[in-house]
Amino acid sequence: MYFRFTLHNYSIKAMKNLFYTLSFLLIILFISACEKDKICTTSDPCAPTMRYFPMAIGNYWIYEVAHYDASTEIETITGKKDTIRIIGDTLIGSDLYYTFEKDQFVPSIVRKDTVYLRDSIGYIVNPQGDIIFTASGFSGLVYRRVLLQTPGANYYFRYSILDTLSLQTTPAGTFDCLDYSACLFLNGIKDPRVIHRYHSEDVGLVFENSFFVSSTIDMRRYLFEYHLED
């Protein structure tokens, strides 16, 4: 009886030791997986998305607006300025979003927009779930935004992030940037034009361009001035 009792106790102890060992190994594996998910660039092996998209109340960015005509390859500085400000935050559902106020110059008018954004585990998203920016996802497709989807038309943007830094020069200075770019597909055919959003660490958006599908004009915004709250 004594032998059986001792063996039983030993089995329980062995099982406990095995449980603790397996738990420890699972924790190590989890940490390793998280380490693999860290954002890596050539300048900083572990730079989080928020360093490239800083969000704090009081931050602002001012951009010089230019128009580039693809048919003539001429860029024209318009003399207009776009402004993006973070003016507050608000709860939408159970999530806290920063409130962005945008004054953007479009042909002949200044358009005022209010945008709500938050960080969702390394992805800057709006309440609809659109991915506005990320510093991860180097393996390929990050996000697909459908413009038009009907039986006769399928237009969409395919967003991806490049894993190398590129140098961008603006009136505010020269910056090393990650390029969150989008290719336009029209009924399966890739349009030669590309949307670029260049973000620099501890600065934010440095340059972006946009265009209308039916126009040859490329609207460009170069960082002119910025302020980040400490």
Image (tube, rainbow, N blue to C red):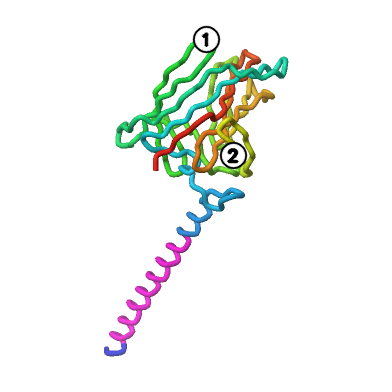
Q: Secondary structure at mark 1?
A: loop
Residue closest to the eye, 11 or 97: 97
Residue closest to the eye, 202 or 208: 202
Q: Percent position (x, y) of residue 5?
A: 28, 85
Residue 155 is at least partly visible in this image: no
Kindly identify the residue that appears in the image at 48 percent across and 54 percent down: 34
Residue 56 is tagged as none
Q: Which residue is mark 2?
A: 175
Against 141, residue 156 (above or below) is above
Which three-letter amino acid code belongs to the residue tagged 1?
Answer: Ser
Q: Which residue is mark 1?
A: 108
In the rendered structure, the answer to whether residue 191 lies left or right of residue 51 reads right
Q: Which residues are magenta?
A: 4-29
Q: Residues within 10 Å of mark 2 (few under 14, many from 20)?
A: some
**On the image, which quarter does residue 217 sit in?**
top right
Q: Earlier in the sequence, mark 1 or mark 2?
A: 1
Q: Secondary structure at mark 2?
A: strand
Residue furthest to the right in view is: 72
Q: Percent position (x, y) of residue 184?
A: 62, 25
